[in-house]
Image: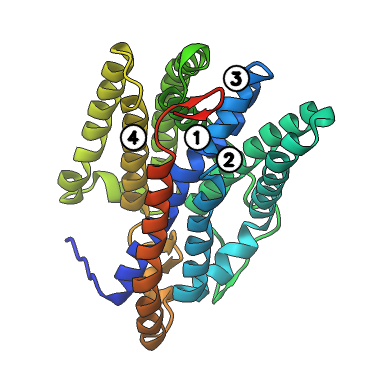
Amino acid sequence: MLDYNFDLTAIWAGIIALAIFAYVVMDGFDLGVGILFKFFPAGEGRNRAMNSIAPVWDGNETWLVLGGGGLFAAFPLAYAVILPALYAPIIAMLLGLVFRGVAFEYRWRDPRHRALWDAAFTGGSIIAAFAQGVALGALLQGIEVDGRAYAGGWWNWLTPFSLLTGAAVLTGYALLGATWLMYKLDGEPHDRARRLAWSLFFLTLGAIVAVSLATLTLEGNYYANWLSRPRLFLTLPVPILTTLVAALFVHNMRYEHHAWPFVSALLLFFLTFIGLGVSIWPDVVPGALTIWDAAAPEKSQVFMLVGAAFIMPLIIAYTGYAYWVFRGKVGTEGYH
């Protein structure tokens, strides 16, 4: 029997899910640019690739702060359990983001060591993307909870499944980066990004299938959430729509569209995110804590919801304005 209770706690779960998805797709493509950075020749190609994300990359990470802060405020018990379980990949992710942020600024100011900063930019992007995927896999495979605390060890996050999800996220971000560069660049860099996008698309599809099948074999309710009746009738559209979006991507690539492959890649990420929600709902720590188990007191949620009602529209507004101002292709002398 299906039983959905959409109350204040569910609203907060939706807000945090929105923030995490916004971070994944927005910071995902600029991490993807970093992952692919070495595939572009030093000089104009790399400069234009970096300029394509220069106006938005730091603003994209606002959503990471909102998602993490929202989890701490709205679901403090989940935060207290998840963070100790994922210390290693989270620390690796943050260090990767620091490396790429420093490299982003220093490569322009220190041309003598530009090759070093380019390597730091690529390495930081790879580490951050892979660590995010590992953290996702570690969460999905289950976290040991004893009472109200994490009961596992330091290395529990490291399994073949978490490494698989790490590789999948790394590949998916690279696909977002390649399609973003198709959209923002022209000439030879555009053609190079297009060739990369073709290969990364098929790798990403393979990764989606592999992770989906592996998830069904994990302990927990994943198999029942996807394949038991009557949920099957609600979950079946997800793989069907994913297949249709994959076909749309191929169509857009064959007709050499510039922007639409990026849109198709975003839709593909959206459907995988929906699939993730299907797998774990209503848990926030799969198999251990539901969103209601981990929720803050109702008065706290109401207080924070008032703040979110003011802050989120501002974030969306200035983010949208930044993308609008810096729309168009990135040429050798900037935007045009």
Q: Position of residue 143 (x, y in %)?
A: 54, 59
Q: Give the mark toward the camera: 4 or 3.
A: 3
The image's mark for residue 248 is none
In this view of the protein, which residue sits in the foreground, 22 or 101? 101
| Circles 2 and 4: CB atoms closer than 8 Å | no
CA gap, disc 4 to disc 1? 12 Å
Q: Position of residue 16 (x, y in %)?
A: 41, 62
Mark 1 or mark 2: whose residue is earlier in sequence: 2
Residue carrying label 1: 173
Tell me the amino acid under the disc marked 3: Gly
Asked if residue 229 lies left or right of residue 283, the reply is left
Residue carrying label 2: 129
Asked if residue 28 lies left or right of residue 21, the reply is right
- Give the residue displayed 48% in from the left and 56% down from the top: 63
| Circles 1 and 2: CB atoms closer than 8 Å | yes
Counting every numbered tag in the picture gives 4
Quarter of the image that includes the C terminus: top left
Mark 3 or mark 2: whose residue is earlier in sequence: 3
Mark 4 or mark 1: whose residue is earlier in sequence: 1
CA gap, disc 1 to disc 2? 7 Å
- Give the residue displayed 23% in from the left and 70% down from the top: 6
The image's mark for residue 45 is 3
Residue carrying label 4: 268
